[in-house]
Amino acid sequence: MNLFAKLERFNPGGSIKDRTALNMVVGKIYSGEIVPGRSVVVESSSGNLGIGLAQICRYFGLRFVCVVDPKTTRQNIEILKAYEACVEVVTERDRETGEYLPTRLRRVREIMAAEQHAFWPNQYANPLNPQAHATTMREIADALDGRVDYLFCSVSTFGTLRGCAEYARGNALGTTVVGVDAVGSAIFDGEPEPRLISGHGASVAPALLDRRLADEVVHVSDLECVVGCRRLILREAILAGGSSGGDGRGAGEARPAPAARGQLRADLPGRRRPLPGHRLFGRMGHRALRRGGPPVEEPRQGGPRRGRRGRPRRRGGRMRHLISIDDLTDDQLRHIVERGVGFATGRNGAARPLAGQVVGVYFRRTSTRTRTAFSSGAMRLGAHLIAYGPDDLQTNTGETTQDTGKVFALMLDALVARTADDPAEMRGWADQDRMSVINAMSSDEHPTQALADLVTLQRRFGAVDGLRVLYVGEGNNTATALALALARFSDVELEFRTPPGYGLPEELLGRAAERARRTGSSVTERHDMDEGTAKGFDVVYTTRWQTTGTSKPDPDWRRIFQPFQVTERLWEGNPEAVFMHDLPAHRGEEVTAEVLDGPASIAFEQAAGKLHSAMAVLEWCRAG
């Protein structure tokens, strides 16, 4: 069994808290909530988070007030002052808990009330705290080829563990997450007791706490943290802080199941002095940490598997693709939706995870929203973009699509393709396992449209679970993707009203209905438009009658479709329903202008959701 440690001391501020500080502040600057030269940032910190915030605030020209207590080291206070932070030291303990944290938080609230333009990041409850550590866990997974059997992570605000655990679950890494808590901490239902190591444990349970994310818990005392620090110095020549010593000690004391026989990873959050950069350091034998001997280096046959241009491959050596909603696990689907909502609200911060990568956008069919969404989204995430139209490639002169795909894979990191043809073509490109392939619409499914719809619904209703959705119109590729996606959520009622002869494929409908039953949902279809029976829905959804790349076999199809036009009459039985349309719309055909342009319509909010869902898909495929 191999034990790896991720050394965070080489971040500019000297600890893992730099990630949290950056994520909590920069996004708010871009959104205008924090204004350099006017705003005052106020935070409670025992040291490292304060230092991270101090350097960020200094860089952007922001005043920073850091509320600390007597347990904060003199060295950390001097570093804060070097960044020109205003340091306030509370000296009284809270009467109920005997700890300084409640007193620090009260002082923060007092400053917030007194300062006109004050902003409190609130590391203890801010969702941007754990979101910063999706990148932390992604770096770990990439460096270890996606194989992380155990993760040991010290806890205080619960941000690092939560972010890493949510990433691991969302990406099906199969990692057992072990929380390393302090003896005397209240995080895992312990009785608060006096502690000496700052930044490890907490006297009150933090708002970010979700105990379900820690598969196991190890408690280490202050003395054991010191012992862990000494071992790191003597055996690895690493000078680390107290919580890092706790992680090392926790990993040494844990006894993973014999079946694991794999790789463990401990997080070393930081050290006393800031230095630039951060990287993984060498592998230590698990037994060496348990005994007195030197680290044991176990050779690895052939070295780590790496991808094209030297980049680490995904777990199992596979690239990630999105050609069908069925390519996603339930956790991955929800993860992409949550990330899409995060991009829409600014919660995801300003990271550029695709920096240095090249994304190709290949559309053989017309597109406004999807093409713009993926082009804009790729650039916003830091990627370079190459766009191809239907007349740009040598396929027009006889080159096969297979050969074209091989060339794409040699030069691109990801390809977003709209073919409106058999998805087997995209599957063939994906099977090369050299670039990520994203289906921007094939003949049978439009998965990225469904993801945009889910992001829109999540933002509008707060959750997709429990919604009643009425789809009116042809059972086309948009309907297919919607059925496969909504069937994954619980207590959803999805009813299709489709013209006779133009319903969903029977096999697909049966598959979606069966999946829905497993989640307590339902997917049904009927071929009439009796508006009197269409009542109590939260969402009315339609799509244009003439689907891109397809034609109707019946020359009299408009007569068959006419009863399925969405009009204001539908709102007599659904007064609170919102209206959705994947656009483009033909007013007077599938929907009247009064509905599309009326107060119930969120069709253009839905269109904006394409950008945010496209960013989430690109991030998941290329950066995790």
Image: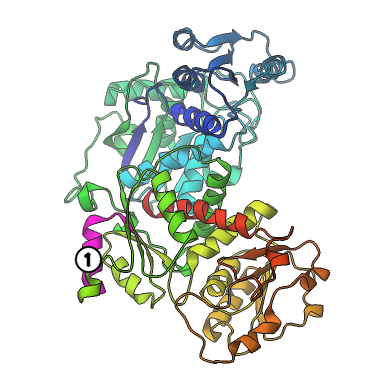
x%, y% of residue 557?
A: 59, 88
For image coordinates 51% across by 75% down, the residue present is 477
Quick one: 367 or 440, which is closer to the camera? Answer: 367
Q: Which quarter of the picture shows residue 120? A: top right
| Residue 9 figure quarter | top left
> Is 516 or 217 nearer to us in this picture?
516
Q: Is residue 219 left or right of residue 623?
A: right
Task: Give the image location of residue 611, x and y in percent.
Answer: 50, 53
Magenta region, mostly helix, strand or loop? Answer: helix
Q: Amino acid at mark 1?
A: Lys
Determine the residue positioned at 21% across, 63% down: 407
Q: Is residue 124 visible?
A: yes
Image position, residue 85 (x, y; %): 52, 11
Q: Is residue 473 above or below residue 147?
A: below
Tag 1 residue:
406
Q: Answer whether residue 412 is magenta in the image.
A: yes
Secondary structure under tag 1 reads helix
User: Does 187 sit left or right of 618 as displayed?
Assistant: right
Q: Which residue is farthest left?
A: 302
Reply above or below: 189 against 44.
Answer: below
Q: Residue at x 56, y 46 (%)?
A: 344
Residue 624 visible in the snapshot: no
The part of the chain drawn in magenta is 401-415
- Give the number of marks: 1
Q: Up-down: is 343 above or below 601?
A: above
State yes or no: residue 541 in magenta: no
Q: Is residue 36 left or right of residue 429?
A: right
Front residue (pair 347, 71): 347
User: Which image quarter holds the N terminus?
Assistant: top left
